[in-house]
Amino acid sequence: MPRNDKRLSNELRSVFLGPGFAKHAHGSCFVKFGDTHVLCTATVEDKVPQFLRNTGSGWITAEYGMLPCSTHDRIEREAAKGKQSGRTQEIQRLIGRSLRSIINLKALGERQIRIDCDVLQADGGTRTASITGAYVALYQAVQRMISKKQISSMPFIDQVAAVSCGINGQEALLDLNYLEDSSADVDANFILTASGKIIEVQACAEKQAFETRQLMEMLTLAQKGATELFELQKNALKL
């Protein structure tokens, strides 16, 4: 079945990673996956959550939010409602644990790095775009820590990127936009490392149960897409 934006089934949307976008952030990245646009920033704080005090370990946490006009209909600010939605909490926890899994937290000392992911425009895959851009922002923040002699060496043990996949009309598709996501038979998100490991897979049948074969087809697509994203991250960071 032809895709509405004419891409091949194994083709990412046009991806842009713009590091250093926010002047006052310790690290930042403006990320575009097609018409999904997210601003990711990183802030280093000289404190850790109470459960980590006096342990010598650092922490990475994340906050995620969609701006009011990021979708067709204006979204109410969650701050105005006085509470976050379950979706928001689930996504920001996903971003945090994805980043914590690829860094030596002990090497940060007792410091916390706070990641903020603000969705400016949504067209599917906001969580995967957030994770991919957040890695770039985090890397810049850590580089700054080294330049300020807060830490002596890079604490990264791997690289992380994320991408969505789905099954639509029995065909596996990479990097779904909103129209594809809203009509997909199966919807999945893959958080992967550059060393070939899996951090998390989120997959669910929207209409009917799917086969192991289809899950593996999506994983193969995700691995291809992630490999391309890893190179874009390296290019953005000039590595």
Image (cartoon, rainbow, N blue to C red):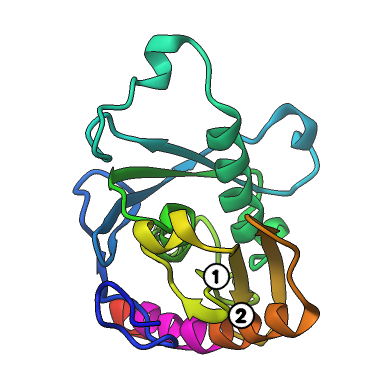
Front residue of 109 and 200: 200
Expressed as whole percent of the image width and height from the top left, the position of residue 30 reads 26, 58
Q: Quadrant of the N terminus?
A: bottom left
Q: Is residue 191 above or below residue 115?
A: below
Front residue of 235 and 89: 89
Q: Is residue 10 above or below residue 29?
A: below
Front residue of 110 and 68: 68
Give me the disc on residue 166. Answer: 1
Residue type at mark 1 is Gly
Can residue 236 be seen here? The reply is yes
Q: Which residues are magenta?
A: 224-234
Expressed as whole percent of the image width and height from the top left, the position of residue 55 reads 80, 43
Residue type at mark 2 is Met
| Quarter occupied by residue 211 | bottom right
| Quarter occupied by residue 14 | bottom left
For the point 27% across and 40% down, the residue is 71
Q: Which residue is mark 2?
A: 218
- Contact between labelled residues 2 and 1, with CB atoms less than 8 Å apart: yes
Whether 232 is among the magenta residues is yes
